[in-house]
Image: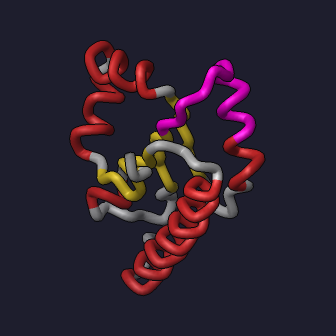
Amino acid sequence: MGYRMPDLAKRAMELNSELNRIVGILKARDVDKVILFGSLVDGRVGSTSDIDLIIVDNTDKRFLDRLGDIYSAVQPRVATDLLVYTPDELERLVEESSFVREAVLRGRVVYEKDS
């Protein structure tokens, strides 16, 4: 049996509420930018939808260390996929990775630090 529309609307509200909570934490951590991509941007929220974020953070930490730090800080309450890149890494990956390029092109910037 599939999800009924009210269930999907409830899921979308739950995801958006969690997104707002996470973005608030990331702002407080002074990240450079947060890009939302995936089903929340495309309007295709389903029963198994999650939050997909690219986080741009100017740091010297290794990828796995910064990823662990961010997951520990936000402690997601729903399924959440986080990718944490430095500005240089993101610039390079937009050129080299079709996945990252599409995520950035089709995604929506939900936070960007003032320069």
- Marks counted in the figure total 0
Instruction: Please name whichever residue, 42 or 101, is drawn nearer the observer in this view of the structure.
Output: 101
Is residue 54 located in the magenta-colored stretch of the structure?
no
Is residue 61 located in the magenta-colored stretch of the structure?
yes
Q: Residue furthest left?
A: 105
Q: Residue furthest bottom?
A: 6
- Is 114 rendered above or below residue 3? above
Q: Residue furthest right?
A: 72
Image point (73%, 51%), residue name? 73
Q: Position of residue 63 (x, y in %)?
A: 63, 22
- The image quarter in which residue 6 lies: bottom left
Image point (67%, 31%), residue name? 66
- Is 105 rendered above or below residue 109? above
What color scheme is it? secondary structure
Image point (47%, 58%), residue name? 49
Q: Position of residue 46 (x, y in %)?
A: 42, 63
Instruction: Please name whichever residue, 111 or 99, is drawn nearer the observer in this view of the structure.
Output: 111
Q: Position of residue 76 (x, y in %)?
A: 68, 57
- The image quarter in which residue 12 lies: bottom left
Q: Position of residue 31 (x, y in %)?
A: 54, 45
Q: Is residue 7 left or right of residue 106?
A: right
- Is 1 rendered above or below residue 93? below
- Is 23 rendered above or below residue 89? below
Please provide the residue range marked out in magenta: 56-69
